Amino acid sequence: MFWDSDQPYPLAGAGLGYDQILAWLREDDEVRLRNLWDAADDMRRRSVGDDVHFRGLIEISNHCVRRCAYCGLHVENTKIERYRMTADEILACAREAKEYGYGTVVMQSGEDYGITVAWMADVIRRIKSEVGLAVTLSLGERPVEDLAAWKQAGADRYLMRFETSDLKLYDRIHPPLGNRKSDRFALLEELRRLGYEVGSGVMIGIPGQSYDTLVNDLCMFRSMDLDMIGVGPYIPHPDTVLGRDPQPLPPDQQVPNTELMTYKVVALTRLLCPQANIPSTTALATINKANGRELGLCRGANVVMPNLTPVQYRRHYEIYPAKACINETARECRFCLKNRVQSIGRTIGQGPGGRVRS
């Protein structure tokens, strides 16, 4: 059942049920969708305010032991040049983040066991003591002992997308590592138990993702009470299993990997999870370089992630091709995003910008 197009606040998180979520995901009427955008933006304003928090992204390694069917970093891709940043290079990026006024650095990599527990713990301690920023990690499915050591070293947040709540689809796109079957939901619970702020999310429009699955994904966000939620469009990479043989569902069942569908999911996520930090992602900026990030911010998002990775490494961190801002320096990226945020009347947040629970 759809809501009347003249109703100003068509949805509320607590009362938003399965049928309503599904209806909005299938909605194409521009007038009705304006109600969704307005409701999400109003919820964002009342729940997390007008500040847009900048998280400085450092892509510290593109090594990965996994064979994920959607990701260009997978271990079998011999066409990319592998790299692993040094501790001093990472600290230089963190100091740059401090100079630009960012409150957080996000260290991201493939699942790289060349990044040892002790080495990473030392990097975290140095960032905390020498630079004083919040530290977010996104390093894949590491053992609980590793995650505990990094939390003890001072890490604040951990990001790990569960990618899809459809276990059959998950097994297809994310093969196990040896005999170790993935259970990201259990690992996300462990992260919360360890005291991390926990972030997760999904890809939108990955081949095999049905509308019912995406509704379930959104309901999982609400039930898990996530602190951060990242959603972005699936962008095919030609050197992956899905890039070569996507095997989508029939058109009436397959979720499209479009810009419009991404905005719907961002907006619904805000309505379902009012207090969560939600980024307007680089993937959105990749499919709409003109104003994709701005539209995401106007439809529920409150975070952007300017890239601090040195340009000589950035082009090799190719999860998907033709990524936005690939040749911009960190300074250029900061200047561009600052102007984009201010152009829509939003303010740049100060401090670490963690989730504030009411």
Image (cartoon, grey):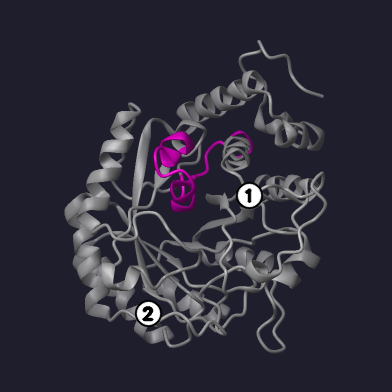
In the picture of the structure, the residue carrying the numbered disc 1 is: 257
Closer to the observer: label 2 or label 1?
1
Q: Residues within 10 Å of mark 2 (few under 14, many from 20)?
A: some
Q: Is residue 82 visible?
A: yes
Q: Which residues are magenta?
A: 271-296
Q: Is residue 293 left or right of residue 255?
A: left
Q: Residues within 10 Å of mark 1 (few under 14, many from 20)?
A: some
Q: Is residue 243 left or right of residue 284?
A: right
Q: Nearer the viewer, residue 249 or 224?
A: 249
In the picture of the structure, the residue carrying the numbered disc 2 is: 120
**In the rendered view, would you say 207 is above or below 338?**
below
SS type, badge 2: helix
Q: Is residue 275 left or right of residue 116?
A: right
Query: Which residue occupies 36% across, 79% down?
Result: 121
SS type, badge 1: loop
- Mark 2 / mark 1, whichever is N-terminal: 2
**In the rendered view, would you say 73 is above or below 213?**
below
